[in-house]
Amino acid sequence: MLSAAAASVRSPDSSSPGSACDVVAVASSSLCGYGRSGPDVTPPCTVKLLTTSQERRNTCNWTSRSRLKNLPPGRRTPGEPQPNMDDEVLEQVVSVFNTLVSWVAAGAMVFGGVVPYIPQYRDIRRTQNAEGFSTYVCLVLLVANILRILFRFGRYFETLLLWQSIIMIGTMLIMLNLCTDVRTATELNTKRRSFIDLDWTYFWSWSRFVDYMQCVLAFTMVAAYITYLLLDSALFVESLGFLAVFTEAMLGTPQLYCNYQNKSTEGMSIKMVLMWTSGDTFKTGYFLLTQAPVQFWTCGLLQVFVDFTILFQVYYYSHFPQKPVSHTVSHTTSAKAL
């Protein structure tokens, strides 16, 4: 039995006397089944005589490339062709670039929703006035992200979206705490309104931050209990997912109504709305590219539409003012002095 993969000898009719690839005998036992027994054994390999110069040249090139591929770099002779390193370097660069882009996209998905509230937070702290910002925005985002987390127990989605919901809940609680402190310090009414009073007239207009926390915890526990009972129902799970993203799509609606009621966008951070628009556009595109559930990208498109409507309000009320500009900062200062 032959153990060599290829044996080469000189052919007497070779046009190149020094050639070593005129006759090639292929006799590999691993490829031909030599040495095995059974009905599926293939016959022994035969010796193929290479009669033309072109066949001899092709065979020599093939065997040279095979030897070069199996030899370590230190044993390659200077006369043998070197591998193309440009392709390998290009593949590594493309791989590193793709990894970098994926990390940037992941960071934008997780923290991109928080960035728009940074200028609004700074404006409220600087002016000590929270009238231009609707705290119902915080309510909408808290409800939407709590429902989204519960939706994940029934239907799996990316972990990045889960972390996005957790971070957004923390951000909205921080915004609520600031708005509550500013409103408590500036309002003249000394009557305290709390969550346990169950007075729907002052719903989400309580005097202490702890009342908002009580409301959020109560809603979370009730929603979690209902989800636990109906988790096996596919209809309930899909409805829960739609309700979560639809509530988030209505994020700009409280701010839209607040601007309409005031006939002005004064006190609202335009940077926040611009960041809303860019973030929602990016998020909707991400949902489409990653083939997220249909509820996600459908409500994402609705959210982008609401953002553009608020931007139109900014343009309209700035060019066609409906009421004289108020001096909010001076009123705030005088109220604090009293």
Image (spheres, rainbow, N blue to C red):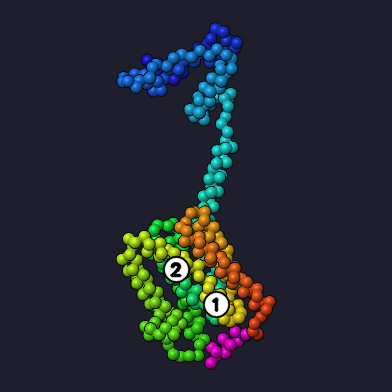
Residue 111: x %, y % from top left = 50, 63
Which quadrant is the N terminus positioned in?
A: top left
> Could you tell me which secondary element the residue under label 2 belongs to?
helix
The magenta segment is 326-338
User: Separation of disc 1 and disc 2 at Cα?
Assistant: 19 Å
Of 331 and 240, which appears nearest the observer? 240
Q: Which mark is residue 144?
A: 2
Q: How many marks?
A: 2
Question: In this picture, is 58 found above or below 238?
Answer: above
For the residue marked with disc 1, what is the amino acid? Answer: Tyr
Res. 120 image quadrant: bottom right
Indicate left or right for 107 with 323 as reference.
Answer: left
Give the number of the disc on residue 120. none
User: Residue 319's image quarter?
Assistant: bottom right
Mark closest to the chain's N terminus, 1 or 2 = 2
Q: Which kind of residue does numbered mark 2 sit on?
A: Ala
Residue 207 in view here:
no
- Residue beneath disc 1: 257
Residue occupying image coordinates x 39% and y 16%: 44
Picture residue at 53% right of the left edge, 9% below the top: 11
